[in-house]
Image (cartoon, rainbow, N blue to C red):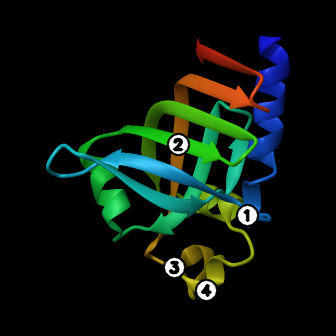
């Protein structure tokens, strides 16, 4: 049963990637005062429940918070599911990663394209998860 739920969660997250239809999730980070903060972000790419990437501004409060504390959580939710991932996150600025993660719509925020100096990628890696899909069963685990 748990692999079935993990596969379903993987499918849900994959459907959110590249700014797809309703491709948003909530990213929670620790702020400068040690409190959790949450932001809605579009998903750039996902590798199952193991890794999720986002595009944002290097000068954003998200990038600053990540540099101070790399602990994070990502949540995908709807009436049918709640997928919560807990792990670590990093800020990436190398050209190869920036080109790979770029998707239609990014140009609205980064007019310089993949070479825009303010454009960066956030890479989240899951350490543990809680998956509740189709209101049938919850699977909690570690990666």
Decide which of tag 1 and tag 2 comes sooner along the chain: 1
Q: Residues within 10 Å of mark 3 (few under 14, many from 20)?
A: some
Q: CA distance from mark 3 to mark 4?
A: 12 Å
The disc label shown at residue 22, or none: 1
Query: Vertical placement of 29 versus 125: above or below?
Result: below
Pointer 2: what residue? 74
For the C terminus, give its image quadrant: top right
| Camera-side residue of 7 and 48 | 7
Residue drawn at 55 percent across, 61 percent down = 41
- Mark 4 or mark 2: name the one nearer the start of the chain: 2
Q: CA distance from mark 1 to mark 2?
A: 15 Å
- Identify the image quadrant of the N terminus: top right
Q: CA distance from mark 4 to mark 2?
A: 24 Å
Residue name at image x 41 percent, y 47 percent: 28
Mark 3 or mark 4, which has the lower sequence index? Answer: 4
Q: Which residue is mark 3?
A: 116
Q: Badge 1: few (under 14), some or many (20 or more) residues near its Cα, within 10 Å?
A: few
Q: Which residue is mark 4?
A: 108
> Marks 4 and 3: in contact by CB < 8 Å?
no
Q: Residues within 10 Å of mark 4 (few under 14, many from 20)?
A: few
Between marks 4 and 1, how big is the CA–CA gap? 17 Å
Say which label, 2 or 3, has the lower sequence index. Answer: 2
């Amino acid at each position: 049963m748990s692999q079935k739920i993990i596969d379903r969660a993987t499918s849900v997250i994959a459907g959110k990637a590249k700014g797809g239809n309703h491709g948003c999730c909530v990213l929670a980070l620790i702020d400068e005062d040690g409190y959790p903060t949450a932001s809605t972000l579009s998903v750039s790419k996902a590798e199952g429940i193991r890794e999720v990437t986002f595009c944002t501004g290097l000068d954003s409060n998200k990038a600053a918070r990540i540099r101070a504390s790399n602990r994070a959580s990502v949540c995908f939710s709807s009436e049918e599911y709640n997928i919560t991932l807990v792990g670590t996150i990093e800020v990436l600025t190398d050209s190869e990663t920036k080109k790979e993660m770029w998707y239609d719509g990014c140009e609205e925020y980064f007019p310089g394209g993949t070479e825009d100096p303010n454009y960066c990628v956030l890479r989240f890696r899951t350490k543990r998860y809680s998956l509740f899909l189709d209101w049938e069963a919850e699977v909690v685990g570690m990666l």
